[in-house]
Every structure is written in structure tokens, then in C-alpha cells.
Image (spheres, rainbow, N blue to C red):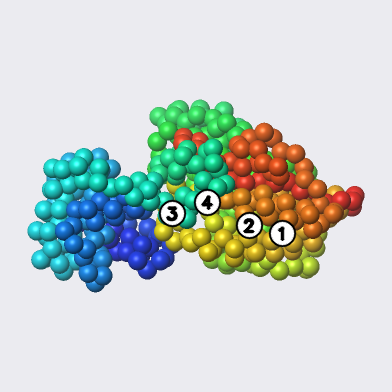
């Protein structure tokens, strides 16, 4: 009989121990279930509290999480409800809590019997909106007209989007390959290399994936290379490049560039090399901390600066962010972003272009950082960008959108002078 032991352990590692979600011990169904539980964590936590007559002791937090997973399985999995109940009860036994099997069974069956009534008792906005209160408050301040749509998008999985490697074939040609394989995708709106599926497709079924015909990348993320607009012979720096999607896109768009990809994490840089090898592109890879100036790198015609950030624009793909990120993190992140911008600006040639990018939707990490940098650096000025997303005084803001892109911010800066 199926149990949720691995799912409970994985959820506990994130929700209790505070580690980034890692699905390595989960099968595809388990991964789907834990991600769904994380995405609706506050809701299922509140429901569990309503169902239990009194809170469980801390030493039985795993049992509380098990009930949450059982509720999520009942509400989201395409299987008979009794199958979810039985798996939850079986898990209680395998967690060496045989005494709790009757409690677990009674709790879930009560939920099945009185679901509407129990759900109606949950009134906490944190539970209803499935976001921590600090994040809800920040959305309202930064996005007063848009925050309801952002919350809705964050609580649903993002679509599966591909980037066609145009060194191998056109987007139209790859669409024909998909049709021949019995798969249907639609061209994305933001990227001429993008394709989107209405429902996820296993990577193993994508024609030519292992041979580098396509990559998985959100259409909003694909904008980065398009906005930087690599030209023949340019020397380009991709700062904070891992896992390499944007670096690869730059080389697919213009293979004659000299690309330098850097990151501070050597293990993540291995993924950059793996992606280069799969896609048949090449560039220089360096393990460096670009929060500090690195004069040995020389100077560049263009720089893609995708800084570490709160990742508030990709919550729907990484729902553990809602549990792990704190409001107090923002100040530290902003200071780090400012250091990155200052150090990479020193690596930009006169007349060169720097694209500042985040996967955040918080103004403090985006427009405010750029505005303060422009005030402090008279050799920097803003370049216009296409009218996409939500226009800002400086740059553009994409918001996470159902059946479309994730949340990203882009601002394009040019350095005064004439390049060599």
C-alpha cells in the first residue's frame, strides 16, 4: 500500500528545519503532492488546526504535517478519496505512531463528511491567501492595483515553457516535431523562441531534449537575453549565471560572442557546463564573487546582472519561498544587490550596456536600487525597454500571471562614453 513517509520527511525538512525543498527522495506523484502542500501550506495548516480538538505536541509535528498532506491529497490528487485516507493512515503506522492511525482516520473522514463547514471556519487572511502576512502587506504596498491577481497566480502552478535552440531549428520546425510526437504547444507571446504547454509534459517525451533542441525556461526569463541583444563579436559577462539558462540563450542568439559566465557556487557552475554541453554552445566559466570587483576579468561590451533576490516573482514554482523567506531578509538582499551593481559597473566599457535583472516583484529590490544607482552615478543613464508588463519610472516589471510568465524586473543601463 502507498504511504506518504517520504513526503512527510521532505515537508518536515523544509517547513520545520528550514531547508530548501529537495525532491530527490520523492517519486513524481510525491513531488507533486509536496509541492501542492507547500503551495497551500497555510490553508492546510489552518484546516488541520480546525480538525484537531487540541494541538499536537511539538514532538509529533510530523503527524500534523501528515494530516496536512492527507488533506492535500484528498483535495488535489486525481484518485479516489479513500485511497488518500488509507495512505495517510498507513503512514502513521510506518512513522511508528500506530496509536495515531485511528486519530488520523477519524480526522480525515470528518473532513470528508463536513468539508464545507470546516473550510468556512477558516478566516485568517494568511490561510485564505496562502502567503505570510509580511508578503501580503508588501504586495499591497508595491502593487496596490495588481496584488489580488499576483496572489491568485502564486497559488497555481506555473505553465511549462520551452526555449527552442535556434542553432538547431526554428520554432516553427520544432512545433512540427511536437505535432509529430502527438504533443501540442502554443508560441509564447514574449519570446520568439518560446513555446508553452497547457499541461506539463515529461522531459523524456520532448523530441530532441537530450540533443539540445530545446530547454525549459519561463518566457519572462527568456526576455533577459533578448533585451541584452547580443551582437557579433561582443564580449559579454553573465554575472550570477547558474544554472546557465540565460548564458545558453545568449549563445544561441549570437554564437560569435565571447561569453564569460560566473557564479560563486562551484556546484551550480557544473550545471552551467552541463547545459553548455547539451546545447552545443561554449563559453568561459569562472567561479567568482562578483559582489566584489574582479579586475582580472577585464571589461565587457555588455553585462547581464541577474542578482540574487527574494525570488518573490517565482513563488509559484518554488512555494517553499513562502515559508523560508523573511521580511528581514530584504535589507540584506538589497545591500548585496547594490554591491553587485557597483562592482559589475566597473567591468563595463564606456558606451556599454548593463541589464539589471531580478526575479522579484518588490520595488525595494528593483526600481529603488536602479534609481539610487542612477542618482549616485552620473555616467549611468537608463535606456528604454519594450512596453511589457507593468511600466515603471525605471525599467519594466513583469508580474506572475496565470497561464503566462513568472515575475521579473528588467532595467537597461548605458555607460557614458564611447566603447573601444
- What is the C-alpha distance between the residues marked 1 and 4? 24 Å
Q: Residue at x 37, y 68 (%)?
A: 17
Q: Which is nearer the N-term, disc 4 or disc 2?
A: 4
369 or 169: nearer the viewer = 369
Give the residue number, with chain letter if any, for mark 2.
307
Q: Which is nearer the N-term, disc 1 or disc 4?
A: 4
Mark 1 and mark 2 residues within 8 Å of each other at the beta carbon: yes
Residue sitting farthest toward the bottom: 59
Above or below residue 419? Residue 199 is above
Circle nearer the viewer, 1 or 3: 3
Give the residue number, with chain letter if any, for mark 1.
341
Q: Which is nearer the N-term, disc 4 or disc 3?
A: 3
Mark 4 and mark 2 residues within 8 Å of each other at the beta carbon: no
Q: Position of residue 6 (x, y in %)?
A: 28, 61
Give the residue number, with chain letter if any, for mark 3.
133
Q: Position of residue 61 (x, y in %)?
A: 26, 66
* Tag shown at residue 138: 4
Q: Which is nearer the N-term, disc 2 or disc 3?
A: 3
Quadrant housing the N terminus: bottom left
Q: Say few, some or many: other residues with alpha carbon within 10 Å of mark 4 (under 14 / 14 to 19 / 20 or more).
A: some
The answer to which quarter of the image holds residue 389 is: top right
Q: Residue at x 68, y 66 (%)?
A: 291
Q: Say few, some or many: other residues with alpha carbon within 10 Å of mark 3 (under 14 / 14 to 19 / 20 or more).
A: some
Q: Say few, some or many: other residues with alpha carbon within 10 Å of mark 1 (under 14 / 14 to 19 / 20 or more).
A: many
SS for tag 2? loop
Q: Position of residue 179 (x, y in %)?
A: 45, 28
Q: Say few, some or many: other residues with alpha carbon within 10 Å of mark 2 (under 14 / 14 to 19 / 20 or more).
A: many
Mark 2 and mark 3 residues within 8 Å of each other at the beta carbon: no
Mark 4 and mark 3 residues within 8 Å of each other at the beta carbon: no
Give left or right: position of 32 versus 197.
Answer: left
Circle nearer the viewer, 2 or 3: 3
Amino acid at each position: 500500500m502507498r504511504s506518504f513517509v517520504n513526503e512527510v520527511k521532505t515537508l518536515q525538512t523544509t517547513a520545520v528545519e528550514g531547508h530548501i525543498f529537495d525532491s530527490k527522495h520523492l517519486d513524481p506523484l510525491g513531488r507533486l503532492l509536496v509541492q501542492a502542500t507547500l503551495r497551500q501550506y497555510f490553508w492546510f495548516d489552518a484546516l488541520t488546526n480546525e480538525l484537531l480538538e487540541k494541538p499536537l505536541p511539538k514532538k509529533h509535528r510530523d503527524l500534523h504535517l501528515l494530516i496536512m498532506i492527507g488533506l492535500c491529497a484528498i483535495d488535489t490528487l486525481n484518485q479516489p478519496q479513500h485511497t488518500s485516507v488509507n495512505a495517510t493512515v498507513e503512514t502513521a503506522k510506518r512513522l511508528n505512531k500506530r496509536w495515531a492511525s485511528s486519530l488520523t482516520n477519524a480526522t480525515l473522514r470528518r473532513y470528508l463528511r463536513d468539508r464545507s463547514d470546516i473550510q468556512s471556519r477558516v478566516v485568517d487572511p494568511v490561510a485564505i491567501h496562502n502567503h505570510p502576512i509580511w508578503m501580503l502587506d508588501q504586495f499591497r504596498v508595491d502593487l496596490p492595483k495588481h496584488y489580488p491577481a499576483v496572489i491568485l497566480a502564486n497559488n497555481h502552478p506555473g505553465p511549462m515553457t520551452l526555449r527552442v535552440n535556434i542553432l538547431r531549428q526554428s520554432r516553427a520546425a520544432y512545433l512540427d516535431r511536437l505535432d509529430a510526437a502527438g504533443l501540442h504547444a502554443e508560441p509564447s507571446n514574449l519570446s520568439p523562441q518560446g513555446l508553452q504547454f497547457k499541461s506539463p509534459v515529461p522531459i523524456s517525451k520532448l523530441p530532441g531534449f537530450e540533443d539540445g533542441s530545446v530547454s525549459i525556461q519561463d518566457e519572462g526569463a527568456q526576455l533577459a537575453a533578448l533585451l541584452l541583444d547580443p551582437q557579433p563579436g561582443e564580449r559579454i559577462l553573465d554575472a550570477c549565471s547558474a544554472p546557465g539558462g540565460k548564458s545558453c540563450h545568449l549563445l544561441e542568439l549570437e554564437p560569435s560572442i565571447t561569453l564569460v559566465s560566473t557564479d560563486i557556487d562551484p556546484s551550480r557552475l557544473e550545471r552551467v557546463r552541463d547545459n553548455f554541453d547539451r546545447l552545443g554552445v561554449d563559453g568561459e566559466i569562472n567561479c567568482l564573487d562578483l559582489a566584489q570587483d574582479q579586475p582580472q576579468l577585464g571589461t565587457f561590451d555588455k553585462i547581464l546582472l541577474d542578482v540574487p533576490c527574494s525570488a518573490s516573482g517565482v513563488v509559484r514554482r518554488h512555494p517553499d519561498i513562502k515559508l523560508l523567506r523573511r521580511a528581514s531578509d530584504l535589507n540584506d538582499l538589497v545591500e548585496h544587490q547594490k554591491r553587485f551593481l557597483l562592482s559589475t559597473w566597473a567591468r563595463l566599457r564606456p558606451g556599454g550596456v548593463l541589464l539589471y535583472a531580478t526575479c522579484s516583484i518588490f520595488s525595494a529590490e528593483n526600481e529603488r536600487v536602479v534609481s539610487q544607482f542612477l542618482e549616485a552615478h552620473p555616467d549611468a543613464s537608463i535606456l528604454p525597454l519594450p512596453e511589457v508588463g507593468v511600466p515603471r519610472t525605471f525599467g519594466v516589471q513583469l508580474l506572475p500571471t496565470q497561464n503566462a510568465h513568472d515575475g521579473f524586473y528588467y532595467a537597461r543601463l548605458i555607460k557614458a562614453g564611447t566603447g573601444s
